[in-house]
Image: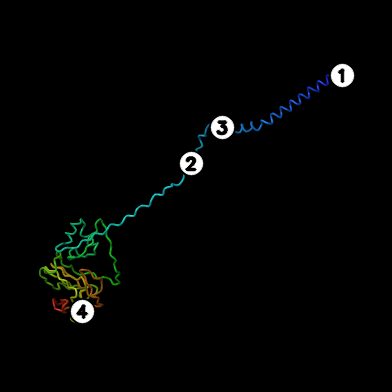
Amino acid sequence: MSFRRMLPFLILNIVVSALVMLGILYWWGQRNIQPTEGLAAVEVPITGIDPGVVELAPTLPPTDTPPPPTPTSPPEPTYHTVQAGESLSTISSIYGVSMQEIMDANGLLNENFIQAGQDLLIPIGGVVIPEPVEEVENVTATPIGVPPTPIPTVPLSEGEADLTVSSFNGIGEISAENILIVNNGSRSVEITGWTVRDSGGTVYTFGQGATLFGGGAGIQLFSGTGEDTTTSRYWGQAGSVWQSGEIVQIYDAEGTLQITATVP
């Protein structure tokens, strides 16, 4: 084949080869920049927040623990020392507390059975510190008869004393039997150590704190058992002590006869 005939084929071969080479070079160039373009496609800026979604921040515990409340001390009790000539009414007026509240706080049975030097708990504002109470197995007998109304306290050494057995109550019934010893004078008499004797030689001795105030104040002496108070004392006998016509004798602490009476 002559060169003249082959020339068109050579030119076509050169053009095809050039196009193939250009195609390869273009493909290679696109391959090198593809990762960059892919990364840019991923990084999409966020222009807003969905208003329907609210993200709450987690609640953290407080770092400062509040101090515990400071305990308050209970109020101190108020006591009043009874002075000569003072009555419960006078003391009530001083502190603005009713007589009944003072009696309840101190276990008093009668508003006038107080004595000079006695310390009384004053329940100001309702503050009462109860004293421990001993349990008593035996049932306290119910007092029979109404004790006379006493007068405000007076010193033991002033005035005159007039002691007597004013009444006999519940004779023959051990649960209620008692005699009422009163002082109709104006001088209070402490009868601690005094004795009461019946015709059969049975003896009762008054213990500490037994005082007969003047103006008709009295102490009931029960034949049976019970808890002693300022106005009631208990002999502790199992049976009745007194009988009609029997002589009652009361001696002071020195053994001197002070009172005699006959059971009606």
The three-letter code of the residue at mark 3 reads: Pro
Secondary element at tag 1: helix
Would you name the residue on which mark 3 appears?
45
For the residues carrying marks 4 and 1, which lies nearer the camera in this image?
1
Mark found first going from the N terminus, 4 or 3: 3
For the residues carrying marks 2 and 4, which lies nearer the camera in this image?
2
Would you name the residue on which mark 1 appears?
3
- Label 4 and label 1: CA atoms lie apart by 174 Å
The residue closer to the viewer here, 104 or 125, is 125
**How many numbered marks have been drawn onto this rendered protein structure?**
4
Would you name the residue on which mark 4 appears?
203
**Residue located farthest toward the right when viewing the structure as drawn:** 1
- Label 2 and label 1: CA atoms lie apart by 87 Å
Classify residue 127 by image quadrant. Answer: bottom left
Would you name the residue on which mark 2 appears?
57
Mark found first going from the N terminus, 4 or 1: 1
Disc 1 crowd, CA 10 A, few/some/many (<14, 14-19, 20+): few
**Residue located farthest toward the bottom when viewing the structure as drawn:** 200
The residue closer to the viewer here, 5 or 166, is 5
